[in-house]
Image: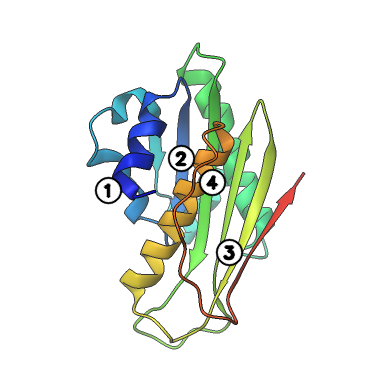
Amino acid sequence: MNIKNLVNKIHSSSFQGCFSITGGGMKIIDYLFQTPGSSKTILEILIPYSKNSLSDFLSNNLDSHVSHIEAIDMAEKSYIRSRALSNNSDIFGLSCTAAISTNRLRKGDDRAFIAWNSKLSNGYKSVLLEKSRRKRVEEDIIISKIILNTISKIIGINEYLNIDLYESEKIEEYNY
């Protein structure tokens, strides 16, 4: 499966969603928009990038940024927004919060949390990448492909892109 074919299948589905993305996974926007039909799928994409913007979006001050708790909260807010913007019953809210390669010293691992809410399932993925092994754009592409795979799962396509990870890297999935 390649990106274009998967995005075509996503756009051909009846599902619509709102997205909230911060820190990484931004290439997903390009993937979804470069293939015709994005207006069928995308209701809204928010990028609450600064701490103030993210706090305002979440209406709270989380102690732990780039966590599964933050991703779940973001996905829930995105799902609520999807319900407000669409009469379609096939909707979802999807979020990604990430800390990836940067131009400064940063504590912690290169990681991402991708969460979703839909009528079919609620869950999140924890993504751990090897720090300083790749360039920022390479990590962003990996996370964006994982987001595409997540959308495929949410809407029942169940076809996936290959994700090239190093042996020490992992993707874990949890339902809630």
Residue type, label 1: Asp
Q: Which secondary structure, mark 2? A: strand
Q: Are marks 3 and 1 in contact (CB under 8 Å)?
A: no
Give the side of residue 24 with respect to residue 31, left or right: right
- The mark closer to the camera, 1 or 2, is 1
Q: Which secondary structure, mark 3? A: loop
Q: Position of residue 54 (x, y in %)?
A: 50, 52
How far is disc 1 from disc 2 in space, using C-alphas? 13 Å
- Which residue corresponds to mark 4? 150
How far is disc 4 from disc 2 in space, using C-alphas? 12 Å
Residue 30 disc label: 1
Pick the residue in front: 129 or 65.
Answer: 129
How far is disc 1 from disc 4 in space, using C-alphas? 16 Å
How far is disc 3 from disc 2 in space, using C-alphas? 16 Å
First in sequence: mark 3 vs mark 1? 1
Pick the residue in front: 30 or 22.
Answer: 30
Residue type, label 4: Thr
Pick the residue in front: 72 or 55.
Answer: 72
Extreme right residue here? 176
Q: Position of residue 25 (x, y in %)?
A: 41, 57
Q: Which secondary structure, mark 4? A: helix
First in sequence: mark 4 vs mark 2? 2
Residue 19 disc label: 2
Q: Looking at the image, is 50 positioned above or below residue 152?
A: below
First in sequence: mark 1 vs mark 4? 1
Whether residue 43 is visible to the viewer of this picture, yes or no, is: no
In the image, what residue occupies the spot 38% across and 79% down? 102
Q: Are marks 4 and 2 in contact (CB under 8 Å)?
A: no
Residue 66 disc label: 3
First in sequence: mark 4 vs mark 3? 3
Extreme top residue here? 87
